[in-house]
Image (cartoon, grey):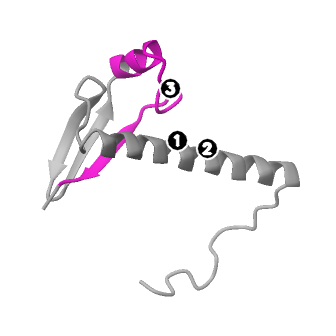
Amino acid sequence: MKGRFIVNPFQELNLTVADRTSLVDLANQCISSNLTLCMKYLDNKRKVDPAHWKPLKEKEKLKVYSERPEGVAAATASGNEPTGSGLPMILCLKTRL
């Protein structure tokens, strides 16, 4: 839908240089960690670890999983970083055609 927001509905956000740098760093960390997870998924032949992810829903060409609490503990115990830093995480994957 081109031209959906002709007028910006949000007030301008004034950030200090330090705040702007912090947000850029946070965005880079999110991208980096998700890219790492994506590469692990592809290396695992597009299979989801059932001990780490619980299937929630499957509809049309999308599968949705939630992160199991014990999956976070197992990741931490094995030296891997938990995905959501303690926050609930979901994983959405396109199913093959």
- Residue drawn where x is 76% and y is 62% of the image: 13
Residue 84 included in the magenta stretch of the image: yes
Q: Residue furthest front?
A: 43
Q: Tell me residue 25's x, y (percent).
A: 70, 47
Q: Secondary structure at mark 2?
A: helix
- Amino acid found under the numbered disc labelled 3: Glu
Q: Which residue is mark 2?
A: 29
In three-dimensional space, the C-alpha distance between marks 2 and 1, rounded to whole angstroms, equals: 6 Å
Tag 1–tag 3 contact (CB < 8 Å): yes
Q: Which residue is mark 1?
A: 33
Judge left or right: residue 65 versus residue 32: left
Q: Residue furthest top?
A: 77
Q: Secondary structure at mark 1?
A: helix
- Amino acid found under the numbered disc labelled 1: Ser
- Residue drawn where x is 50% and y is 26% of the image: 81
Judge left or right: residue 30 versus residue 68: right
Q: Answer above or below: position of 44 versus 25.
A: above
- Residue drawn where x is 66% and y is 68% of the image: 10
For label 3, count other residues whose C-alpha is less than 10 Å away and answer few (under 14), some (14-19) or many (20+): some
